Image (cartoon, rainbow, N blue to C red):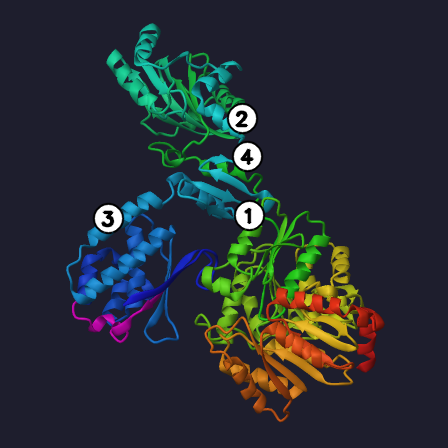
Amino acid sequence: MHFRKMMTLRGPNIWANYPVIEAWLDLEDLKDSPSDILDGFNERLMAWMPSMIEHRCSVGERGGFFVRLRRGTYQGHILEHIALELQTLAGSPVGFGRTRETYEEGVYKVVIAFENEELGKASLHAALRVCHAAVRNTPFNIQDEIDALTELAQRVLPTTTVRAMLKAAKARQIPVELLNQDGLMRFGWGVNQQRVYRTLSSRTATVAAELARDRESSLLALAGVGIPVPATEVVTTSEAAIRAADATGYPVVVRSRFGYSRQATFAQLTTPQQVADAFAKAQAVSREVLVEHQQVGSTWRCLVAGDRVVSVRVVAPSPSCPLPIDAEAIDQLSPEFASRIVLAAQTLGLDVAGVDVVAADLSQSLTSQHGLIVGVHPVPGLAKHLQPTHGTAQPVVEAVLDRIIPNGETGRIPLAAVTGVNGKTTTTRLLAHLVTQARFPTVGMTNTEGVYINQKRLESGDCSGPSSARKILHHPQMTAAVLETARGGILRAGLGFDRCDVAIVTNIGSGDHLGINDIHTVEELAKVKRCIIDVVHRETGFGILNAVDPLTVAMAEKCPGRVLFFAIDGENPVIVEHRAKGGRAAFVRDGMIHLAEGSHEIALIHLARVPLTLAGKIGFQVENVLAAAAGAWCLNLPMEAICHGLETFGNEDFASPGRFNVLNVDGATVILDYGHNISALERLIDALSQFPCSGQRHIVYSAAGDRRDEDMRIQGRMIADYFDRVVLYEDNYLRGRRPGEIIERFREGIAQSNRQPIVDGITGGVAAMQHALRHVQPGDVLLLQADVIDESVAFMRQFLSSKSVSLAASPTISMVELVAAITSAS
């Protein structure tokens, strides 16, 4: 039994809307051995880990997991429960787990929630050791495993303060990320984000934090505005420290000059030897050391957030103080006392601060009792404020968080996510273009061609995964984001965001990439694509779904927010029923795009003014336009911005590279498109039938090697049924296939057709395009599949440039002329 792989799904995923680890466990020779037939296994495991009696499991009651053990369950399920319990025993209680068998017999996906990735993975490995020992009946010390995990947890888990901040942010729907183990966090996205170190935010100026760190300078600043502070003497030798103590009178306090308020602070020193010892320890923190007289009274830590004191706890009670250490005492604080505390924080420029005060009575003014402010901490801890030994805990975390992301805001920016089998890249590009028209200063986009900011590409390649999404959301200038979200990234690492305002699923159709990553059916694929629908904002978000596709329609019931259905036909039964209930829809009537909510309709724009659709003749582009326009509407973009964006986004000059780019080459119509699956090919053939063709129909086509044999054969038959001349090629995407095998599978499909076109096999996508272009004649229609989009577009640009002489004699047809030609042909 061993782990084949582990994946950390840091964003919402097919298992849960929070981070999980997915481990693939191969049971090997234990695949047919449930727990009830393993001699002594259950008894050993229950004796080693009796606390698992609290696991209810599917039985639904205390002891439920032990019931499952006795009935017989497999090692994957057992390991899941052990890993969860080990995390809990180590100090990181988590409760979510799932175990599911893969399509390969004896291989299971074990899924567990985690607080810290390193601890979660260590718990899985420890759980595997427990299982092995229990199966083999070998000596095993479970306490050693728990102790090792506990030690790890103490190193890697966030502090109580950081944990509380993370929890409070999530409760307020603020996107938050822990950036390191020392407590650096990021709250919010784009222009609204704030970095926070424990309780110190990026709103606080560096000079303020540094001033607070210099105790001597900070006390001088406080004294300058009339705040009572202790008289201090700066010393650099032990002898000078003793002389200062003798001069000021015992008892004294010795502190390092640089550091935070209570760091390297030694109080109630009454002898020269104590002063000398304290000086040595303080000088280990900073060369300069402060000596001051010990003020009579209790020491209080006052937590300031903005313009108010939110908590007061007693740090060192005097003999006359009735409160125990760390008791909450804010109810005793007088307004005058509180005003001095707030003034101290504001004088140093701190938005959040811990102010240390020595005073006998909080209910009296600070000056009347000769109280002193002895230090100000720019990064106050919250742990002891959260759990006072006496009194009522105050909402300190919420108060601090409100200084970071104020006014009940979430720190988010508008975010639209797009997925589907076909059309998602075009829809993403178009929606980003529409958002740009609404005058968002900085619009980020990710898709299968790269990462873009305001339509300028910053990175190339397939950037439709979570890491690219985070690059956009973490960009400090970003004001809106449109993110293509592909299946591979979801399965590998989850989503790159926890919530979205708009989620568009273009279609599922007959699927794609089936048989890869244990996704074998269109229903399983739909569950993956549905992840963006699962995280739609509950109050204001929209899931935008294709009303023609049953698998996308079924996603509506899982959408936490509202739903908009789109389809070309406004009389689609799904749309009719949805509108009858007051729902939103997008459709076409009499050539006009309509946006509707219940019985109310907006006639947006005529398709003749939307160049991407070729006056509405290209059905799949009409659907893409409907989805993008609906997304823009649900993002509350102005109608005039939506219309202008639709009018200015076309398929000429590769505005959407490799997405039905229509060209004229010496009288032949040439179309460059990335379509590479059954559904896409079907829609392309339907679109090509709208083009006038007085000659032959040509195609250059292939598929990635990880596609199923049956899918290649089906596409081969479809190609033969429609095209007269076929160029099959192999290039970058063999993916484990031997050279020539992909072409063989397509030829097998072609042989099943009643039509037998001319078929050539070529190595190299560009070489195949060159071969086809040499044979195309005026009046022909040629469909070129873009193998690598950037490479294919670059080739076509170069090819068209080299044809400039002949193109001058036979100028490239304009979009208006092309639409007219299509219309007359139909």
Q: Earlier in the sequence, mark 4 or mark 2?
A: 4
Residue designated by label 2 = 349
Q: Amino acid at mark 2?
A: Gly
Q: Amino acid at mark 4?
A: Arg
Q: Residues within 10 Å of mark 2 (few under 14, many from 20)?
A: some
Q: Earlier in the sequence, mark 3 or mark 1?
A: 3
* Residue range of the region highlighted in magenta in the rendering: 23-40
Residue designated by label 3 = 147
Q: Position of residue 45 (x, y in %)?
A: 21, 62
Q: Amino acid at mark 3?
A: Asp
Q: Earlier in the sequence, mark 1 or mark 2?
A: 2
Query: For the residues marked 3 and 1, what is the alpha-carbon distance in whole angstroms?
Result: 38 Å
Q: Residues within 10 Å of mark 3 (few under 14, many from 20)?
A: few
Query: For the residues marked 1 and 4, what is the alpha-carbon distance in whole angstroms?
Result: 17 Å
Left or right of residue 470: residue 608? right
- Within the magenta stretch, is there residue 111? no
Q: Position of residue 558 (x, y in %)?
A: 53, 65
At x 56%, y 43%, the residue is 193
**Above or below for 713 versus 120:** below
Query: For the residues marked 4 and 2, what is the alpha-carbon distance in whole angstroms?
Result: 10 Å
Q: Position of residue 701 (x, y in %)?
A: 61, 78
SS state under label 2: loop
At x 59%, y 87%, the residue is 717
At x 64%, y 61%, the residue is 428
Residue designated by label 4 = 203
Is residue 61 in view from this perspective? Answer: no
Which corner quadrant holds the N terminus? bottom left
Residue designated by label 1 = 474
Q: Are marks 1 and 2 in contact (CB under 8 Å)?
A: no
Q: Position of residue 325 (x, y in %)?
A: 32, 27
Q: Are marks 1 and 4 in contact (CB under 8 Å)?
A: no
